[in-house]
Amino acid sequence: MTALAHTRADLATALDGVTGEIAVVMTMGALHEGHRELMRRARERSAFVLVTIFVNPLQFGPGEDFEKYPRTLDDDLAACRAEGVALVFAPSRDDVYPHGAPSITMHPGELGEILEGASRPGHFSGMLTVVEKLLLLTRADVAYFGEKDFQQLALIRRMARDLELPVEIVGVPTVREADGLALSSRNRFLSPDDRIAALALSRALREGAAHGDPDAVLAAAHKILSEEPGVRVDYLALTGSDLGPAPDEGPARLLVAARVGGTRLIDNVPLTLQKGA
Ligand code: AMP
């Protein structure tokens, strides 16, 4: 049985009887296999898994897709039920922000200014603010986030660390379609032609990650992206696995953001660098 709470009062009532660990998966709904993998990972460890479904207006900039973001609550509930989720919290905007837009918000710091932060001003502040609120409202002991949003995961880890939040943050590798496309709620906006063009993102990352030399990694990825006219690259970046400068050798991350048709997509992969390889 999956219970549903729409208000923070209902959520509190549902949580009052819980004795064991509370595992939380935060989502914006339009659930797919990526979200479901997070639920499965949570369920493997914790008897009580709570999924939040909230399209957070604070993390969308003007002109972004807040209004048209897919909302599919009935299907989402069915997915949660199938994954053995104990409780779904699907609050309204007023329930999350009862006093209107908060005047005190999270400041993501330098890590929030690069990559997605540079392209989407205010996004990470809005994201961290709602994550902090939802961690407290859900009384999360452990929370699962996807590596698909790698910078988001890094910022949430840092927020938990820097602000002493009593929660364990677990990252889960990206779930992909068989052809490599990273699952995303926004993929449903892709036309059949867009869908083909979008494959260049994961292909570029895969080809790039097959190299060890930093220049060769970027050159290989850039070549594939530049050969696909349907893809407008926002950034292609090679960083350390903490999103700092890429090392000459050792673990690193290759990240891409691009527009395909009217849809903005992001993806990233881990890789190991070796100068001259
Ligand atoms: P969203 O609903 O897009 O805000 O995503 C909710 C959570 O699911 C975030 O922690 C995402 O990183 C994670 N997620 C989204 N897509 C994937 C994916 N393809 N693989 C793994 N995790 C994902």
Image (tube, rainbow, N blue to C red):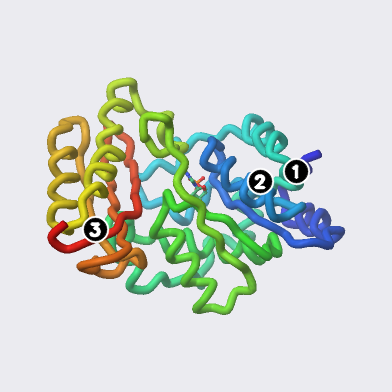
Mark 2 = which residue?
Answer: 90
Count residues near mark 2 (Cα–Cα under 10 Å), then give few for <14, some for 14-19, many for 20+. Answer: many
Secondary element under disc 3, as helix, strand or loop, is strand
Secondary element under disc 2, as helix, strand or loop, is loop
Q: Nearer the viewer, mark 3 or mark 2?
A: 3
Q: Is residue 145 left or right of residue 52?
A: left
The residue under the point 23% across, 42% down is: 207
Mark 1 = which residue?
Answer: 4
Residue that protrudes farthest toward the top in the picture: 192
Residue type, mark 2 in image = Ala
- The answer to which of marks 1 and 2 sits earlier in the sequence is 1
Mark 3 = which residue?
Answer: 238
Residue type, mark 1 in image = Leu
Q: Nearer the viewer, residue 46 or 149?
A: 46
State yes or no: discs 1 and 2 in contact (Cβ < 8 Å): yes
Question: Which image quarter is the N terminus in?
Answer: top right
- The alpha-carbon separation of the residues under discs 1 and 2 comes to 7 Å
Percent coordinates x, y for residue 83 in the rendering: 68, 39
The residue under the point 55% across, 43% down is: 35
Question: Which image quarter is the C terminus in?
Answer: bottom left
Percent coordinates x, y for residue 204 in the rendering: 23, 41
Q: Nearer the viewer, residue 47 or 98?
A: 47
